[in-house]
Image (spheres, helix red, strand yellow):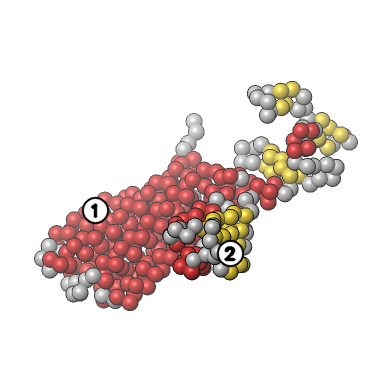
């Protein structure tokens, strides 16, 4: 045994026993620190770069944060407590206790807001204790039950549907459908929080990466950026719906057709970029950029055609058009991330 490049690294020689079995001894200090002994189980993983990782079989469970205790002060607003709860959820706590500080019980508005938020936006979370003196949330969903890819795929399907519905409610000034779109945004937000939680835990413990359905640490960063872009895209569908609520007169068929043509192209770009991500397809991602200039050209055409619209409607229409353009821009952002994740497929070696 010899020391190599720092006190935490050693070089040990491979030995053979029984004529065909290769063995290597483990550092005694490491064995003691992890409370191991004869017949202890070890987890051996082959990493992407060819190295072996050795860890106690219970390493993942021990490395996962378990319980968080959040103190609720009388002056805390429900939103402030929700932010504390979200932070605890995102870093991976499985049990989150909210208890009063210097008061006999939680304020009713604090309790009710937290319960509504947990039920609406925290995937895999149940309220296991609900009393005036304590509210406890437990995360029951484990990694294999809902992979990051599956959660993101659901987000993308919902987001594309929101945009298509937003144009349908613009055509018919369907205010009820517009309100449904606004409410649907909660579904996208809850998957975003779930994905961020899983990715944060994977970064803290790389052995989780494959359990959440990804290949390596670089994928974690890429999927985090994609999830953010998808969330923003859904927000723009909401913006369109909110502006529809402010429009009182239907658009002319000509103006609507131009706006819909622009929207169809933007949504097509979004769906193509997402498809490229799940297929790991560099060329498909590259095709998204070829459509970007066309969106800008259609936008100019639409803006020039709505100038005769009644003045109180123009502001809302301009905001709708801007949201469609932003959807196209977020689609190119996603496509660029896919290019970065799949660039090896486009590189040739001499």
Q: Position of residue 77 (x, y in %)?
A: 43, 60
156 or 279: which is nearer to us?
Answer: 156
68 or 153: which is nearer to us?
Answer: 68
Q: Quadrant of the N terminus?
A: top right
The outermost residue toward the left is 308
Question: Any mark on residue 46, and which?
Answer: none
The residue shown at (54%, 58%) is: 102
Q: CA distance from mark 1 to mark 2?
A: 54 Å
Horizontal relation, residue 198 to residue 163: left or right: right
Precedes in sequence: disc 1 or disc 2:
2
Question: Any mark on residue 296, and which?
Answer: 1
Question: Any mark on residue 134, and which?
Answer: 2
The residue shown at (65%, 37%) is: 50
Residue 162, placed above or below residue 61: below
The residue shown at (63%, 46%) is: 207
**Secondary structure beneath disc 1?**
helix
Please tell me how crowded label 1 is: few (under 14), some (14-19), or many (20+) other residues with Cα within 10 Å. some
Horizontal relation, residue 169 to residue 137: left or right: left
Residue 200, placed above or below residue 253: above
From where the camera sits, is residue 192 visible?
Answer: no
Q: Position of residue 338 (x, y in %)?
A: 44, 48
Q: Quadrant of residue 158?
A: bottom left
Q: Position of residue 296 (x, y in %)?
A: 24, 53
Horizontal relation, residue 224 to residue 17: left or right: left
115 or 168: which is nearer to us?
Answer: 115
Please tell me how crowded label 2 is: few (under 14), some (14-19), or many (20+) other residues with Cα within 10 Å. some
């Amino acid at each position: 045994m010899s020391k190599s490049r720092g006190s935490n690294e050693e070089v040990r020689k491979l030995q053979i026993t029984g004529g065909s079995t290769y063995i290597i001894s483990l550092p005694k200090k490491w064995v003691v620190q992890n409370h191991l002994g004869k017949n202890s189980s070890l987890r051996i993983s082959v990493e992407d770069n060819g190295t072996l990782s050795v860890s106690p079989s219970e390493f993942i469970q021990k490395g996962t944060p378990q319980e968080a205790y959040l103190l609720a002060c009388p002056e805390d607003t429900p939103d402030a407590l929700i932010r504390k709860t979200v932070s605890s959820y995102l870093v991976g706590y499985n049990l989150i206790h909210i208890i009063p500080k210097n008061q006999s019980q939680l304020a009713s508005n604090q309790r009710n807001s937290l319960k509504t938020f947990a039920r609406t936006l925290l995937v895999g979370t149940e309220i296991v204790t609900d009393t005036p003196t304590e509210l406890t949330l437990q995360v029951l969903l484990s990694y294999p039950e809902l992979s990051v890819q599956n959660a993101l795929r659901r987000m993308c399907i919902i987001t594309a549907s929101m945009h298509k519905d937003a144009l349908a409610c613009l055509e018919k000034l369907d205010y009820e459908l517009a309100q449904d779109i606004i409410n649907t945004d909660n579904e996208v937000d809850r998957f975003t929080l779930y994905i961020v939680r899983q990715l944060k835990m994977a970064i803290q413990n790389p052995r989780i990466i494959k359990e959440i359905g990804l290949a390596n640490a670089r994928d974690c960063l890429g999927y985090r950026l994609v999830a953010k872009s998808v969330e923003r895209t859904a927000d723009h569908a909401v913006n369109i719906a909110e502006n529809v609520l402010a429009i009182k007169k239907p658009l002319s068929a000509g103006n609507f057709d131009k706006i819909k043509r622009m929207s169809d192209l933007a949504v097509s770009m979004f769906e193509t970029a997402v498809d490229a991500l799940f297929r790991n397809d560099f060329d498909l991602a590259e095709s998204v950029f070829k459509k970007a200039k066309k969106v800008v050209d259609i936008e100019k055409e639409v803006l020039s055609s709505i100038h005769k619209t009644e003045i109180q409607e123009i502001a809302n229409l301009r905001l709708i058009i801007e949201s469609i353009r932003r959807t196209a821009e977020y689609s190119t952002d996603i496509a660029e991330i896919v290019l970065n994740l799949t660039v090896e497929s486009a590189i040739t070696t001499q």
